[in-house]
Image: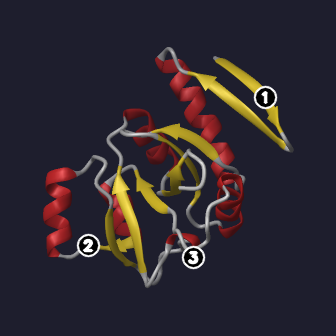
Amino acid sequence: VSFQQRRQGCMIMRVYRIRKRQDSIAAIKAAVVVLRQGGIIAFPTETVYGLGCDATSAVAARRVYHMKQRERNKTLQLIAGSLAQVKAVSKLGYWERMLVSRYWPGPLTLLVSVRPEAHVSSFAIQDGRIGIRVTSDPFLQKLLRVYGKPIAATSANRRL
């Protein structure tokens, strides 16, 4: 597997170059370890690169905000690997089910009610709702399915 390790400030980054299926598997395994340890990953989506963390970890979410210099009033969205992952953390009404049947997987983010029993960081919740979508990016879909739950995410640009 081809990767480079870089130091940026007090953080150490590991950048994977994915050229073959085996590289993808190694990168997914490494990303899952980082997520489970409360770290931050950068990943491709259908539209932009994203920064993500465990959606249940307030500590990891704070790191994303700090890294990006993001204002606290801007919540993180959740990205899921499957509709089952979405249903585990949110309640989908009739209209939401109609939209997801047509547009998911894909870049459509819906604002839906969070399940009270869902362990989602307050950094992703506003007024009892979360923004969530199911990715259509094959690499990210595999990563999220292996991880087993959605991640809290934002775009990888600064301050947006």
Labels 3 & 1 near each other (Cβ < 8 A) = no
Residue 43: image location, x then y, percent: 53, 38
Which amino acid, by three-letter code, is at mark 2?
A: Leu
- The percent position of residue 131, horizontal first and vertical second, equals 39, 66
- The image's mark for residue 122 is 3
Q: CA distance from mark 1 to mark 2?
A: 42 Å
Q: CA distance from mark 2 to mark 3?
A: 20 Å
- Tell me the CA gap for discs 3 and 1: 31 Å
Determine whether the residue tagged by mark 3 lies in a helix, strand or loop.
helix
Task: Give the amino acid at mark 1.
Answer: Arg
Q: Tell me: residue 44, above or below residue 93.
A: above
**Label 1: which residue?**
6
Q: Position of residue 109 (x, y in %)?
A: 32, 59
Rendering coords of residue 59 (x, y %): 72, 66
The residue sitting at 21% across, 76% down in the picture is: 93
**Where on the picture, by quarter, is residue 136?**
top left
Assess whether mark 2 and mark 1 are in contact (beta carbons under 8 angstroms).
no
Q: Choose between 144 and 110: the one closer to the eye.
A: 110
Foreground of the two, 18 or 26:
18
Label whose residue precedes the other's in the sequence (3 or 1): 1
Which residue is painted at 43% across and 54% down in the image? 79
Q: Residue at x 65, y 53 (%)?
A: 68
Left or right of 14, for residue 150: left
Sort mark 1 into few (<14), some (14-19) or many (20+) by Cα contacts within 10 Å.
few
Mark 2 burial class by Cα count in 10 Å: few <14, some 14-19, many 20+: some
Q: Are marks 2 and 3 in contact (CB under 8 Å)?
A: no
**Residue 15 placement, left or right of 19:** right
Mark 1 or 2, nearer chain start: 1
Which mark is on residue 92? 2
